[in-house]
Image (spheres, rainbow, N blue to C red):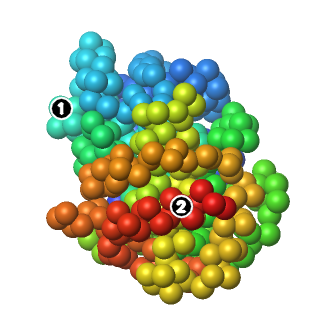
Amino acid sequence: MKQVTLHDYSITVEENLSDLKNWIDEQQYSQFIILVDENTKKDCWPIFKAQCHLDEVQLIEIKSGEVNKNIDTCQNIWKQLLDLKVDRNALFINLGGGVIGDMGGFAASCYKRGIEFVNVPTTVLAQVDASIGGKLGIDFQYGKNLIGLFKNPKRIHISKAFHQTLSNQQYNNGFAEIYKHALIGDKVQWEMLRAVEDLRQLEMDKVLYDSLLIKKRIVEEDPFEKGIRKALNFGHTIGHAIETYSLEHDETPLLHGEAIVIGMIMEAFLSVEKVGLSKNELKEIINVLRSKYIDYQIDSNILEEAWQYMLLDKKNDRAKVMSALISSIGTPVINVELSQGDLKNALEFYSNL
């Protein structure tokens, strides 16, 4: 078992959920509410139930997917909480990926001005990204996470037992954020990751722990994203626009990590001209990322719509689109303005790879 301790909560990385069970046994919660979607209900709930043995659990089920991360789903959650007569002494457990964690934490933090919640992330993506930092929220109209707040969970418990439920596509999807953490904060970890052909063969306890330590260091230095925490948005300024466009137009939309990989390649390209990333490191980044992810063909008509999505990004400063780039592998540069011309150049560069 490995543990990452922040100032008011901890993240436990373990083979099973024994530490969570022991902690719950010591508490005096009035009810246990577990938020799932149809996938985690089928694949992850049996694992959780077998390892935690909670009595009188109430499941709230929502539809999976980023498309359902909205206020309508939150209203559904709140209605079910009221129907179940849930009081403020209950514990709300988010069992699932990033959408469940973001939206479930948001719903719990708003219900009756807040009930305590625990995150049990079941995807690699949620375990290394959404699990730490206290950022909660929902998508609103044309922007990701435009409505939300900062609120830390009571605890986070990460178990490798859930990895068996993930397809290779979903497994690799989570590694996008592991690659990102290395690119902005740990060249040694990047060197280790770039040499790996089969990600399933990695010692995941160590990989998850090391990646979480990078994010912990950044989040503790800047808990409300006023400075260096913006580095965690590397790949996301363009990546979120690509992801939103895909959600709107593709029959099978990109996964979050797949969109962020595209964003990291484009923003690494822009880093060469804007902040001095070497062309050799750009080539290295492209080769590593493209070897693990689908070859997505970007629509030639994407420019105007993607730019409008970028103008709505919550990290912007007034009318300026702001991004985080890298001057070298492991060294981020924050608050770099991007223009529509930059986006055009990056789209053309990616399309010609």
Mark 2: few, some, or many residues within 10 Å (few <14, many ≥20)? some
Residue under numbered circle 1: 112
**Is residue 227 left or right of 296 when viewed as pictured?**
left
Q: Earlier in the sequence, mark 2 or mark 1?
A: 1
The C terminus, quarter of image: bottom right
**Residue drawn 42% across and 42% down?**
244
Residue 159 visible at all: no
Residue 109, horizontal then vertical, whole percent = 26, 40
Residue 39 visible at all: yes
Q: Is residue 5 above or below residue 240?
A: below
**Residue drawn 35% across and 75% down?**
336
Residue 87, horizontal then vertical, whole percent = 24, 26
Amino acid identity at mark 2: Glu
Q: Residue 244 carries which label?
A: none
The quarter of the picture where residue 187 lies is: bottom right
The quarter of the picture where residue 335 lies is: bottom left
The N terminus, quarter of image: bottom right
Q: Is residue 61 above or below residue 265?
A: above
In depth, the one of 349 and 237 nearer the eye is: 349
Per the image, label 2 sits on a secondary structure element best described as helix
In depth, the one of 241 and 129 nearer the eye is: 241
Amino acid identity at mark 1: Lys
Residue 69, horizontal then vertical, whole percent = 37, 33
Q: Residue 348 carries which label?
A: 2
Residue 193, horizontal then vertical, whole percent = 72, 67
Q: Which of marks 2 and 1 is in front?
A: 2
